[in-house]
Image (cartoon, rainbow, N blue to C red):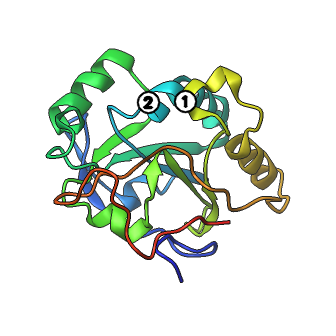
Amino acid sequence: MGFTLDIGASAPAFNLPATDGRTYALEDFSTAKVLVIFFTCNHCPYVIGSDEDTRAIAEQFSEQAVRFVAINSNSKNTYAEDSFEHMVERMDEHKFPWTYLYDESQNVAEAYGALCTPHFYIFDEARKLIYIGRAIDYPRAWESAHTHELVDALKEHLAGEPIRTPITNPIGCNVKWDGKERHWMPPEACDLV
């Protein structure tokens, strides 16, 4: 097994503060038929370049009981813009349709094996991993994307079909691990496919 969760793995538990002033655990999303957890941040150009696409996807599937949860695990010591205070400001400004959680310890990012921002994980109703990777092939400017793997996976699963491509390589900035240089990756991390 590599650094990142394998298909079929259970969603690791978490208990994290959110920008709305609450603290959330995995069980707080139990009414979701499908749970999309994605690792993100405030500063990354791949995140900023694709946030509106992610918004559109979250809104597209919301009526089918698909819930999106964003987690920022980046060290504020690497990028001050990734602090919790800036997360609150960003949500106030953009009003994204997801819950935005702060993983200051980075334990959740490690448990999930988050590699990049953004990095998407789809869990089924039993909270088993059914898709991992990117949302689109060009997150830096979503209008230029040619492939839409996250939408494809959600449509296939909700239609009761197997996901044709359950693993893709995420595209984005690497997670900023505290105490490491900003481009450091865990040695056991590698391309997923």
- Say which label, 2 or 1, has the lower sequence index: 2
Residue drawn at (30%, 45%) of the image: 101
Based on the displayed image, in which of its 4 quarters is residue 99 positioned?
top left
Q: Nearer the viewer, residue 128 or 4?
A: 4
**The disc labelled 2 sits on which kind of residue?**
Pro
Mark seen at residue 140: 1
| Residue 20 screen position, x and y as percent | 25, 34
* x, y percent for residue 74: 28, 48
At label 1, which amino acid type do we have?
Arg
Q: Which residue is mark 2?
A: 45
Residue 13 in view here: no
**Depth check, front residue: 178 or 122:** 178
* Residue 176: image location, x then y, percent: 29, 51
Q: Residue at 34% x, 52% y: name it.
A: 183
- The quarter in which the N terminus is drawn is bottom right
In the rendered image, is residue 89 in sight?
yes
Is residue 33 toward the left or the right of residue 16 in the image?
A: right
Q: Quadrant of the C terminus?
A: bottom right
